[in-house]
Amino acid sequence: MLLKPCRFIIVSSLALAAVPVAAAPRLNGIIGDHAVVQRDRPIVLSGSAAPGETVMIGFAGRSVLAKADGKGRFDTTLPAPAAGGPYDLTIAAPSGATVFHDILVGDVYLCSGQSNMELQVQSAQDLIPDARAPADDQLRLLTIPKAVAVAPVARFADPPQWVAAGPATTPAFSAACFYMVQALRRTAKVPIGAIHSSWGGSRISAWMSDAALRAAGMAPEADLLALYARDPAAANRRASAAWEEWWRARSGDAKGAEPWQPEAALAWNAVPRLEEFETWGLPELADYNGMLWYQRTVELSPAQAQGPATLSIGRIDDADRTWVNGIGVGGSSDAGQQRVYTIAAGILKPGRNTITVNDDDVYAYGGMTGPVNVMRLTFADGSSVPLATDWRYAIAKPGAGSAPRVPWDSINGAGTLFNGMIAPLGRTALAGMAWYQGESDTGIPGYDRRLTAMIADWRTRFGHDAAFAVVQLSSYGAPTTKPGDSGWAVVRDAQRRVAAADPHGGMAVTLDLGDPLDIHPGEKHEVGQRLAQVMRARVYGEPLAPAGPAIADARRSPAGDVTLRFSGVTGALQALGANHAIGFELCGSAPNSCRYASGQVAGDQVTLQSDGQPIARVRYAWADVPSVNLSDRARLPIGTFEIEVH
């Protein structure tokens, strides 16, 4: 790399106008007009140009030379700039030149996750003053378009569209992300760029690279995705076989006697209409979340059955696995995707053919929803048979559970969103990352391993010392009246443990901001403030707790009482609305041994009185919707935790 004064790469407007835009070198990543780049960090650039040509890049008074390889790819690095701007970034080569204008240097943040990160300012508390703040040219926003890829892509399909925060741009941006960076602008006093890359309903595995998947013990999923990129038909066959094995293990069905077999003896009923089954007016399906089998037969002539065919069955909410004559032909878990599957030659036969669909409804409405005009079986000669009527259904046996998902699924896959929405960021330097996700991983073991692996992998790309703030899941679901299992609590505790073990990490606890009836609580302003506190502590070194009050240890006294000590407490702990703290459970070593306990609060400690039964661990807020009342003087709550007693 050769550094030169910037004057050697200045290109006149006449020269720029004379060169076709398509011939100019192109940059990968997110640098464009109005962008923000990270201060005090080298700017790593990659792009494409004519094979073998020399590319000159200038920015903020410095320039570098890079040579494109035989495939036209180049990589280079600009020296670390100090905060400031605006500047122009110029790329010039014999094939053409491009200038990006109005680029600031400051701190850059990435916000990612699922729908609670995606929720826009205009859908949250849009009437509060901060939602309608005046335009701030020093705060720039970038939303990454939704994209799925089975292998990492180097460049976004469209150039990045940075905008300055203001009344016309803020409402459609991520609320939690905007309120975080808005708060940071008030304290950091430097330009700030916020990159939002989220997709509602997504699992964490979809945001993980191949390396992260393997580090988290998901090598089979990574291998299957790689196979799909090379040979989709072979990958679908393997996925169907894995799904079928999963079903037999859960159901006890013998091979050849499963519900997808043409002669399966189920309690079949006629489908009233192809729409959400909750609307059929049947009491047993009014609030049903689980599996439903759909089946239909088709009579085919020898000519129709002769070759390959295409099966189109519309949308299915949430996930499907589909068979024709007992042979798996495909499956997806994208509720908004129309299912179109290829039927290989030899699967269809003259006479009666059976189409069987398993619908796995995991949340809210479910079913085969059409549209009916696209539902048909199309043959190699272009003729088709409509499939809009004559379906029957049967409720799956209890206890089947949520089925495996294929790794190439958009939001439930493995690496698909990383490949399409994170990998194209390249080596963008970041000050910090905010992560708001976990709802879709409830009930899936190993969230701590997946989150740890993803954080480590993202830091190799965006900065080894970049802060990472996790939003702990809030409350959602049915309240409880006795101790028990909670998938949401398991995820919350995994988030807590990962954040606590990360020297550059922190956590925004949101238990007090949830809504038992709405998985998308609208209180995102406070979420943003708590995320900003993590960044203020980890990025700017302010004397703040990066997670608010957090459990530190649990000690047993000679009398058998348990004293819990908390770190990060502002002022002192306090029990709101009562003279004791609730939400604690004393637990033995055995399953189902937890029982409620109240706590006496003093300073940064809570004491739980012994009840005479064995105590091996303590749980707090261990429910989907826990009843708790403990916070510190800054009104920051304590999040869900489980800890061993020593």
Image (cartoon, rainbow, N blue to C red):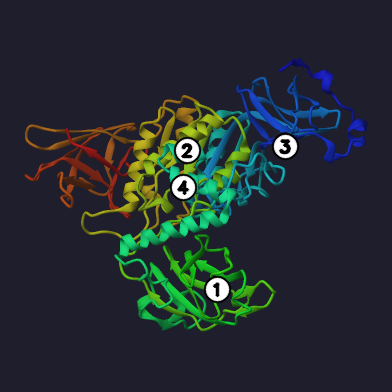
Camera-side mark, 4 or 1: 1
- The amino acid at mark 2 is Ala
Q: Which mark is residue 221?
A: 4
- The amino acid at mark 1 is Leu
The residue to which callout 1 is attached is: 348
**CA separation in Å, label 1 and label 3:** 52 Å
**CA separation in Å, label 3 and label 2:** 29 Å
Instruction: Identify the residue at horizontal 51%, vertical 31% (top origin).
Output: 459
CB contact under 8 Å: marks 1 and 3? no
**Relative horizontal placement of residue 127, taking residue 548 as reference (left or right):** right
**Relative horizontal placement of residue 319, taking residue 313 as reference (left or right):** left
The residue to which callout 3 is attached is: 32
Mark 1 crowd level (few <14, some 14–19, many ≥20, 10 Å Cα): many
First reached walking from the N terminus: tag 1 or tag 3 = 3
Mark 3 crowd level (few <14, some 14–19, many ≥20, 10 Å Cα): many
Q: Position of residue 339 (x, y in %)?
A: 57, 66
- The amino acid at mark 3 is Gly
Q: Quadrant of residue 27?
A: top right
Quadrant in the picture for the C terminus: top left
Instruction: Identify the residue at horizontal 43%, vertical 32% (top origin).
Output: 505
Instruction: Identify the residue at horizontal 37%, vertical 69% (top origin).
Output: 256
In the rendered image, the vertical position of residue 368 relative to residue 420, given as above or below: below
Quadrant in the picture for the N terminus: top right
In the rendered image, the vertical position of residue 288 relative to residue 74, given as above or below: below
The residue to which callout 2 is attached is: 212
Number of numbered tags placed on the structure image:
4
Question: Which SS class for mark 3?
Answer: loop
